Amino acid sequence: MSSIELYELEGCPFCTKVTDKLDELGLEYDSHFVPRAHGERTEVEEISGQTGVPVLVDHDHGVDGMPESDDIVAYLEETYGQREG
């Protein structure tokens, strides 16, 4: 199991932005696809306190449920973007 987990919805452009960044950085992650209906997204709500996606969990860095694609992309870049060298 990867230390990074992503809760996402198929076809969600905000989720795609995050998966593109994860792929660009060469990071392994576990995807959890959530139901389309917000009322059925109990798992992601328990983790992040809301039903929107994407939501990122990074066990190695103590991130328990980060929402908002722009925040996630910035976090990934800051945390994993300078790993070379």
Image: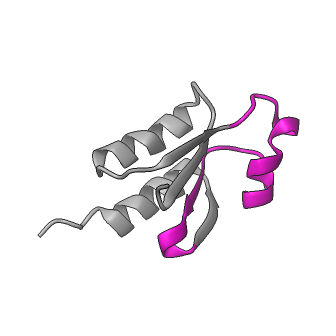
**Residue occupying the point 54% across, 68% down:** 59
Q: Give the range drawn in magenta.
A: 34-62
Residue 42 lies, in percent from the top left, at 83, 47
Residue 56 lies, in percent from the top left, at 57, 55
Q: Is residue 80 left or right of residue 60?
A: left
Residue 75 lies, in percent from the top left, at 45, 63
Task: Count the marks.
Answer: 0
Which of the 4 image quarters holds residue 78? bottom left
Relative to residue 35, is residue 53 depicted above or below? below
Residue 8 lies, in percent from the top left, at 61, 39
Extreme-bottom residue of the structure = 62
Extreme-right residue of the structure = 39
Q: Is residue 32 magenta?
A: no
Extreme-top residue of the structure = 11
**Residue occupying the point 57% across, 24% down:** 11
* Residue 49 visible: no
Of residue 14 and residue 48, the one placed in the foreground of this image is: 48
Q: Is residue 43 magenta?
A: yes
